[in-house]
């Protein structure tokens, strides 16, 4: 038994909205490192939810790899200056693309994805039919 895409997609929309809400709340109430690092990790969490929204049957490890690779690509694109130029014109672009490259962010993206991938893996293992489960003997 697995969770159907018709169930996964709305759940991922809700999850992404919750991650965004938490990130914006932290941003409004705090500043400095907490705001920076939690925002980076929560951004990656939203991307993971987005990956599962687009590909609801994807297993946890590939979903995590796609999410982290996307985050890293966006971060590295900031080296070009294009995201900064777009962010100067649009709040949405600023939220999605960021402004400037920060190598520390490259480390925080997996922090936002790993717990979700672990929870996804545990849920998938619980829903897997008994015949497909690996048991210790």
Image: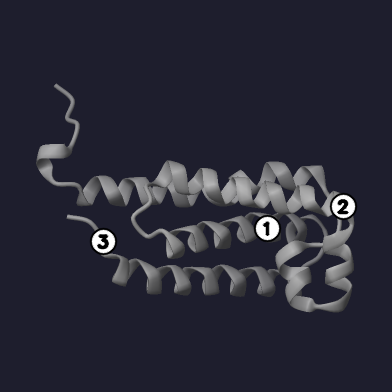
Which disc, if any, is residue 3?
Answer: 3
Query: Looking at the image, do the residues carrying marks 3 and 2 touch, with CB atoms under 8 Å apart?
Result: no
Numbered disc 3: secondary structure: loop
Label 2 and label 1: CA atoms lie apart by 24 Å
Q: Nearer the viewer, mark 2 or mark 1?
A: 2
x then y, percent, for residue 111:
60, 46
First in residue order: circle 2 vs circle 1: 1
Left or right side of 72 for 67: left
Dot 1: few (<14), some (14–19), or many (≥20) neighbours within 10 Å?
Answer: some
| Residue designated by label 2 | 80
* Residue 73: % across, % down: 70, 49
SS category of the residue bearing label 1: helix
Residue receiving disc 1: 38
Mark 2 surroundings: few (<14), some (14-19) or many (≥20) residues within 10 A: few
Cα gap from disc 3 to disc 2, whole angstroms: 40 Å
User: Within 10 Å of the Cα at label 3, are there few (<14), some (14-19), or many (20+) other Cα atoms?
Assistant: few
């Amino acid at each position: 038994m697995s969770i159907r895409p018709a169930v996964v997609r709305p759940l991922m929309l809700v999850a992404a909205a919750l991650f965004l809400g938490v990130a914006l709340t932290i941003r409004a109430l705090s500043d400095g490192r907490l705001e920076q690092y939690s925002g980076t990790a929560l951004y990656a969490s939203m991307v993971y939810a987005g990956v599962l929204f687009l590909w609801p049957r994807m297993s946890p490890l590939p979903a995590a790899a796609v999410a982290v690779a996307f985050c890293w690509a966006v971060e590295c694109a900031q080296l070009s200056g294009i995201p900064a130029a777009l962010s100067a014109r649009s709040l949405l672009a600023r939220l999605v693309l960021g402004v400037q490259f920060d190598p520390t962010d490259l480390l925080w993206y997996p922090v936002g994805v790993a717990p979700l991938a672990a929870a996804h893996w545990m849920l998938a293992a619980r829903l897997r039919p008994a015949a497909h489960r690996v048991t210790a003997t």
